[in-house]
Image (spheres, rainbow, N blue to C red):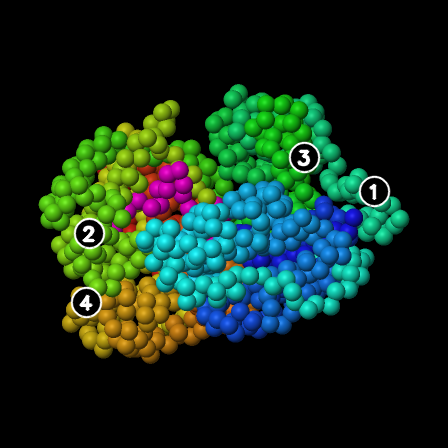
Amino acid sequence: MKKLILIDGHALIFKMYYAFLRRPMINSKGNDTSVLFGFTKTLLELLIKERPTHLAVAFDPPAKTFRHEIYPEYKANRSETPELIKESLKPLCELMEALSIPVLMQEGFEADDVIGSFSKIAEKNGHTVYMVTPDKDYGQLVSDKIFQYKPGKSGSEHSILGKKEVCSHYGIEDPVQVIDILTIWGDASDNIPGVKGVGEVGAKKLIAMYKNVENIYNNLDKLPPKQREAFKEASSYIELSKQLVTIKTDMQLPWEESSLELSTPDFSEITKLFSEYEFSSLTRMIPRLKTLFSITNSTETNIVDLPIAEEKRPLPWTLGSLQEVITKSQKTKKICIIINEDTLVAGSDNQCIILPLRKSLPEPLLQLMENPDITKCGYDLKRLSGIITSNNRELKGYLADPELMHYLISPESSHKQETLSKRYLGISSPEEQQPADLFTSSNEEDHTKKALEEISILSPLTSELTAQLEKEDLKNLYEEIEMPLITILSSMESYGIKIDTSMLTRYSKELTEELNAIEAQARELSGEPTLNLSSPKQLGILLFEKLKITEKAKKTSKKNYSTDEETLTKLASAHPIVPMILEYRNLKKLLSTYIDPLPDLVNKNSGKIHTTYNQSLTSTGRLSSVRPNLQNIPIRTERGRLIRKAFIPSMEEGVILSADYSQIELRIMAHMSEDQHFIEAFREGKDIHSATAARIFNTPEEQLTREQRSKAKVANFGIIYGISAFGLSQRLSISRNESKQLIDEYFTKYPDVERYMQESIRKAKENGYVSTLYGRKRYLPDINSSNQIVRGLAQRNAINAPIQGTAADIIKMAMIKVYNRVKKEGLKSKMILQVHDELVFDSTEKEASRLAIIVREEMENVARLKVPLTVECKWGPDWLEAH
């Protein structure tokens, strides 16, 4: 059987772009290889799985097509093609050439047209055709021997659509009727006008009833009045719409069957390219390709049972006794650990044991965990530390956590074991090989199999990552900051923080009464007795149709009026009800996000809340907090601040102590920019915002107005984030011209700050990344993008990331210093929270003074900058009083 696969290249590229958008693949050179990897992997899997006899990839040409000629507004709504996609086209074509896969492109036509025409020609020549694309438009091409092959989403299986499936989906008799459905439906992304008010469902019903667009117009009198008018309005352009959605099937193409026939790739070139792009997992697929082509090129006709080359995995691990594992670990000086919900797997040198976590761990294993000479290898060693602590022991020794190690190497990539084992070892992990999560299986054999496979990967993986840390000059950052923090964060999570639930209950009742009062007042003011302030739709109709508070009402993509916070804030003075709505929402958010949920999160055994710190999530190096997020407790409003009153000490005669770095990011900017005016102001202990205002407004500090200091403060912090004149004008509610003058004057008075900013951008363009004072890297692949918006964001990150990342490094180092000092001096006080630049402690009145001295000394002296680090330290009966 002749089997032709035609791939819609651009559709597949965009699919891969969005699939990797949140977790891109960044190689050791700092290049984003996500699109290239995803596209190539899909292509190889198609070859191996489907074994076509003929194959080609079609791309859209860079120039405009015939559709633009007949309709200049075609695709006018589309944003500029992302830079990564543009950059991926050339290496993709190189890979296609190495794989001996023809690339089809025809000037003046889209890939759809090329595939449509080739499909029909191939069908006439006895081929079964599979069009690989997620694009719904291709449904119109499906026939007895032409199928649409839709790649699966989020790892799900692909689907193959034939005539039956297409007709069933649309409720039609022939796939060609898809053209009529698309004509009526229109396409917002391609800017193809449809019939107003008729969407997918309506279009399907109409074509199912009337068969085609022409018949609908012949029966307009049978349509509902509103729909009839919509079709009359569309009559002037309906033929154009049909032309635009119809895929060409009659292009004059040079049909040479042999040119599309699968031919043997250049395996040496493929190996070289995969090595260059660091596609180790794809390199492991080359033996399968070789086997495929050796059979394809032979006289064999039965290729259903094509043998697949086994991947080279680490030596198989086996179950052993506790004593065997202890002995091997003492010999290798390493123990590997895997933890799931209720099981701990520990082993060394190809032998392991599986232990239930519901019982205390065996004493010999606990002694091994406390041995500082034994390296501990495994994912989520923070959790392991908590387990060991619950067994009244302490986790010691070198901690090799692959997730945390890779976080430093490539902070915005995926750190999952299956991803890393593919990338660094060229193997598939058991998680990818098994369709189900075996740890949730009731089959004990499945549990054991997965445990043995996962633990076998840990040692070689951590060795590879250690070498990569050394290569990237990140080993010190891991060993001196991130690794010591593992046990400290575990200790903080285990200890928890006490909450005054009765205070929150009272506060909830108080705010609920306020909430109800505001809604009652709004109903009276609006004359709407059933008004629901939580309904954006009701509010939109009230504000913009009944009250008409503005003539330029914005609408959302779903055609509802926009009533988001930004919109209403701008219209706050338009009507008294608008501030009520904003106040109502603020109160409701406080109740639903913080006040009401917090009591339910108190652990019944400890009586405290136990947050979880993410150490490998943010791109800047900052810690984040989840379940619950205690770093996001409001501080800007009076009502929000009162929530902190519920955070109380757990010790007798206790106090909460808070230590907060003062303006640490501005101080780091002063150090990095070496601006003498900033440095002098900080050294002299001046109010930095007043000092800045005095310089840019040429006014003595004692004569400054509150407004001038406020503008200087916004400028100071805005500069760190690369704020634009437009952004500053929005923030200060001033004209863009005035904000530009303010920024210009700022840089005139602080030229070294501007020099620092330009130098940061230059380094990012040259290296592809920027670094903190301690070597933490932030990769910026879009820094040279031709898209101004994308490039601007990357430039702002180039300015801010070294500052914010250095602040994150400093607070982490301070946590380590303070924790060790408190422990050394034998204090009962415990560090319980880290909120970016602030550390919070559970202490006693007796220890508070001593603790404050320790904290200040360690936090202020943890780094030597050109300006002093200063810490504000207070304590009180709750977090509010201490802050």
- What's the residue type where badge 3 is placed? Glu
* Dominant secondary structure, magenta: loop
- Which segment did they paint magenta? 615-637
Of tags 2 and 4, which is closer to the observer? 2
Q: Which residue is mark 4?
A: 707
**Of the residues under marks 1 and 2, which one precedes in the sequence?**
1
Q: Which mark is residue 120?
A: none
The residue where tag 3 is placed is 453
Q: Which residue is mark 2?
A: 542
Amino acid on which the number 1 mark rests in the picture: Asn
Label 2 crowd (10 A; few <14 / some 14-19 / many >=20)? some
Left/right placement of residue 254 relative to residue 401 reads right
Amino acid carrying mark 2 in the image? Leu
Q: Dot 2: what SS?
A: helix
Q: How far is the residue under mark 2 from the one under mark 4?
A: 36 Å
- Residue 652 vs 535, above or below: the answer is above
N-term-proximal mark, 3 vs 4: 3
Q: Find the distance from the CA under tag 3 to the CA under tag 1.
A: 33 Å
Mark 1 nearby-residue class (10 Å; few <14, some 14–19, many ≥20)? few
Judging by the rendered image, the residue that carries numbered circle 1 is 302
Circles 1 and 2 in contact, beta carbons < 8 Å: no
| Sequence-wise first label, 2 or 3 | 3
Q: Is residue 486 left or right of residue 29?
A: left
Residue type at numbered disc 4: Glu
In this orientation, does residue 286 appear?
no
